[in-house]
Amino acid sequence: MAIQAGVAAAKTVLEARKKKDYSANSLKAFEKKLHEDPALKDMYTFHRVPAYLRNRRLYTIYPELVCSAAEAVYRVDGTGKKKISKELRSQAKGRVSLFTLIRDLIGGARTF
């Protein structure tokens, strides 16, 4: 993103130099370039993602829950199996509260 901003700044300065106009009005083109650049639009769209990705449960508890539930559901051992949603709830007991899980899901949905 910083590189894209640098490119936009360089283009703006080159245009200003070509016109020999370094006025504030001429340099406003920089801001316009920033808002039009797809990479920088993404920066504004996804600005909440870095904070969300600091959630340690995304890298510890949740992958373990999914793997444990999948193993329990797909293991061939001659026993009846629970639905994966019930198995996930069973695996989550004592590891993460339903409130925390829902809060994390909503937090993730709000980042995009």
Image (spheres, grey):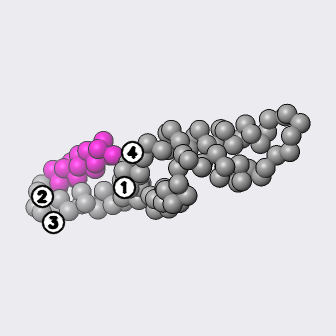
Q: Amino acid at mark 3?
A: Asn
Q: Are marks 4 and 3 in contact (CB under 8 Å)?
A: no
Q: Which residues are magenta?
A: 1-19
Q: Which residue is mark 1?
A: 47
**How many numbered tags mark residues here?**
4
| Residue visible at 20% across and 62% down in the picture | 28
79 left or right, relative to 94: right
| Residue visible at 82% across and 46% down in the picture | 81
Mark 4 or 3, nearer chain start: 3
Q: Are marks 2 and 3 in contact (CB under 8 Å)?
A: no
90 left or right, relative to 7: right
Looking at the image, which is closer to me, 1 or 46?
46
| Picture disc at residue 25 | 3
Dot 4 crowding, Cα within 10 Å, few <14, some 14–19, many 20+: few
Q: Give percent across and percent down for residue 37.
A: 37, 55
Q: Give percent across and percent down for residue 59.
A: 49, 39
| Residue visible at 36% across and 58% down in the picture | 44
Mark 4 or 1, nearer chain start: 1
Q: Give percent across and percent down for residue 1.
A: 33, 46
Q: Which residue is mark 2?
A: 21
Q: Which residue is mark 4?
A: 54
Q: Give percent across and percent down for residue 12.
A: 23, 52
Image position of 64 with respect to 11: above or below: above
Mark 2 or 4, nearer chain start: 2
Q: Disc 1 on helix, strand or loop?
A: loop
Mark 2 or 1, nearer chain start: 2
